[in-house]
Image (cartoon, coloured by chain):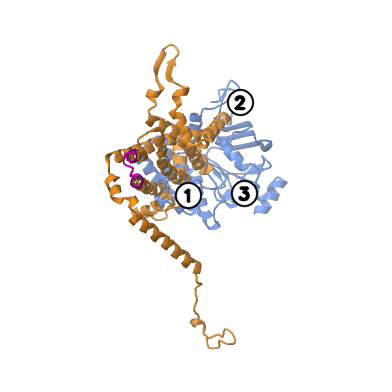
Amino acid sequence: MTTDSDPSLHAPENMMVYARGVRKSFGKVEVLKGVDMQVPTGSVACIIGPSGSGKSTFLRCINHLEDISGGLLLVEDKFVGYDLIDDRLHVVRPAELCRRRADIGMVFQNFNLFGHLTALENLMEAPIQVRGLSRREARDRGMALLERVGMAHKADAWPRQLSGGQQQRVAIARALAMDPKLLLFDEPTSALDPELVGEVLAVMLDLARSGITMVVVTHEIGFAREVGDQLIFMDGGIVEEAGDPREMLRNARSERTRAFLSHVL
Amino acid sequence: MSQSLGARQHHLRVEDLTVVPLRHVWLWISTAVVLALLAMVFWTVGTNEAYDWPAVGRYLFHPSILRGVVNTLMLTVTIMVLATIIGTIIAIMRLSPSRILRTFANAYIWFFRGAPALIQLIFWFNISIIMPQITLSLPGLGVVFSARTNDVMTPFLTAVVALALHEAGYMAEIIRAGITSVPPGQTEAAATLGMSRRKILWRIVLPQAMRFIVPPTGNEAINLMKATSLVSVIAVDDLLYSAQTIYARTFETIPLLSVVAIWYLAMVTIMSIGQHFLERHFGRSDSRGDGGGFRAALRTALNPMRGRRT
């Protein structure tokens, strides 16, 4: 809880993700060198950039899969892994961290579906274990979500029996099963065969229209242009440029952004 | 279309070509040798009076032999359950972020797996030399419990303690290998869903680790069942000790050893069938058909490619 009244330690109103000067080092290697970012509630932000630019690391810092080495990183005006008490950041207890993480969904490049559970059971596990839903409730909600991503016919299939695109759609449904206020996507289509990318992007488009806040690390410039409210270009551990996707794709201010876009477009 | 295949074979057509298989001369010879050896073994087992098969039949269901079978089974189950519990704790310690816990776990495995089971058994049997009296005293309450070590440590309990600590060293390694075989992405995905560390371990990691844990654990259980025959040296009346007691009196050594072997083989076969069904249960997400019914179970049970140490 940010009890401190210092306005510089608070996010503007209606800001889902607010980052200022976020730094992160792995040993001696500094991966994030002061990231500034603002993702308003209900908007879709797409992060692009060359590999090694720190975009996936930054995403993993948002839900505290990685702790940050410095800076301010707030979700709904709160630190995820810390409590600010008397001007000091206290690491939160594991149970509290779990509670805060439950509100932030994440979709991985490699899907990471639970291999020992069926598609439907993958969606039921956390709502039962974390939210305390009954099996029956969890099953009904799970089926509704599988319906939404077009996977109801595979409810009893094991992950191994599904194609990459199908696994990713189930993984998105699994994240939605916790009713998250924020969804993080870590290169959700990068591990897919080209013909399977479309079905996953279609589900993400549907989500974006529903008004959920999304932060998407992606290489799909087309998706960023059509769906994104904001395009963020990261390079060398900082945000090089951020703005309206169409405007930026047409006329980027930074030389490095233009160079990167000329490679991927 | 007939195509000629060389100067002297103008008339040979492609459709007429036949394949001549390679003659496996050595395969035939070795098969003949094995069959001859088998015949000799059956002949001598069937005709040599020393095997005394009628005596085997007489003793197979002898009350003290049956008591030995029950004791062997009880030892095996008790030790295996304890070893799995201790082994899981040691395995989790080995994966702990604390260096002291990791070092302790490594030392435990090094010591209890490294020292021969027979020596550990005899050591625990003589524990009263080191500690004649077991005393529990709490500050403020004084002595809560006190007894002579030899009254507490019955031979059966001695066997359980010694072999469970030994076996736990093996189980710890099997369980650790199983846990590390589960990709870290599984833990991350569960963490982002808000699951606690304990729930992730029990609901996500261990169920998937079981596919790697069950097969070597089945081997351990089978090895352990046979290794419990070591306890005959400290006079626990297990299967072997019961047989020894009888043949010390009647000198029917060979028939009684046959009885013991038959019982061990029967128990190992039943355990292997159980293992097959466990493996099928934990491998069901692999979805290669149903994995086979009872007949397949019997086939795995009789598969000689298992068991490596005694």
Relative image position of residue A176 (x, y in whole percent):
46, 42
Give the letter of the chain under mark 3.
Answer: A
Q: What chain is the blue one? A: A
Type of the residue with mark 1: Arg
Q: CA distance from mark 3 to mark 2?
A: 33 Å
Q: What chain is the orange one? A: B
Pointers 1 and 3 within a single chain: yes
Please say if B293 is above or below B78: below
Q: Residue at x 56, y 30 (%)?
A: B98
Type of the residue with mark 2: Pro
Can residue B88 be seen here? The reply is: no
- The span shown in magenta is B245-258
Give the letter of the chain under mark 2.
Answer: A
For label 1, the crowd category at 10 Å Cα-Cα, with few meaning under 14, some 14 to 19 and many 20 or more, is many
Give the numbered dot on residue A246: 3
The main secondary structure of the magenta stretch is: helix
